[in-house]
Amino acid sequence: MGKLLMVDHTFLYTGQFKKWKQLINDGSIGNVKYFDSTRINLGLFQPDINVLWDLAPHDISILNYLIKDIPYSVNATGVSHTNNGIENKITLHPFLISNRA
């Protein structure tokens, strides 16, 4: 088939993510143990879409770019600010086991 699917590639080629990757790789910020990520349905509000399933894949793509380690645990907490029970704000915490000394 010869097709390649890229998720969130626009963020990965920005200067700040390239710098973060450099700082992580050269050890300047120490041994990364976890990331925090908060997603809120801003912009075009979509009350029928869970923000975790809609936007968290972008954060996971960024994490995979910055850190090659696989999270051993992920904690996600969501809140619905509407009466339909669909989360429109989440906090995502992937915890890492680092292979780096």
Image (spheres, rainbow, N blue to C red):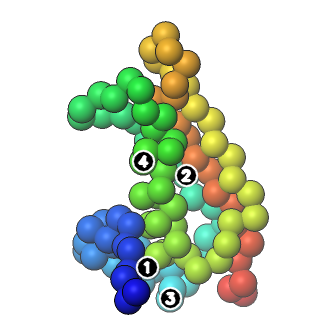
**Apparent side of residue 77 relative to residue 49 in the rendered image (left or right):** right
**Apparent side of residue 65 relative to residue 34 in the rendered image (left or right):** left
How far is the residue under mark 4 from the one under mark 1? Answer: 21 Å
Q: Earlier in the sequence, mark 3 or mark 1?
A: 1
Amino acid type, label 2: Asp
Viewer-side label of 4, 1? 4
Labels 4 & 3 near each other (Cβ < 8 A): no
Amino acid type, label 3: Asp
Instruction: Specify few, some or many for label 3: CA neighbours under 10 Å numbering under 14, 14-19, or 20 or more.
Output: few
Amino acid type, label 4: Leu
Q: Is residue 77 visible?
A: yes
How far is the residue under mark 2 from the one under mark 3? Answer: 21 Å
Residue topped by disc 4: 55
Viewer-side label of 2, 3? 2
Label ID, residue 21: 1
Residue topped by disc 2: 36
Labels 2 & 3 near each other (Cβ < 8 A): no
Label ID, residue 26: 3
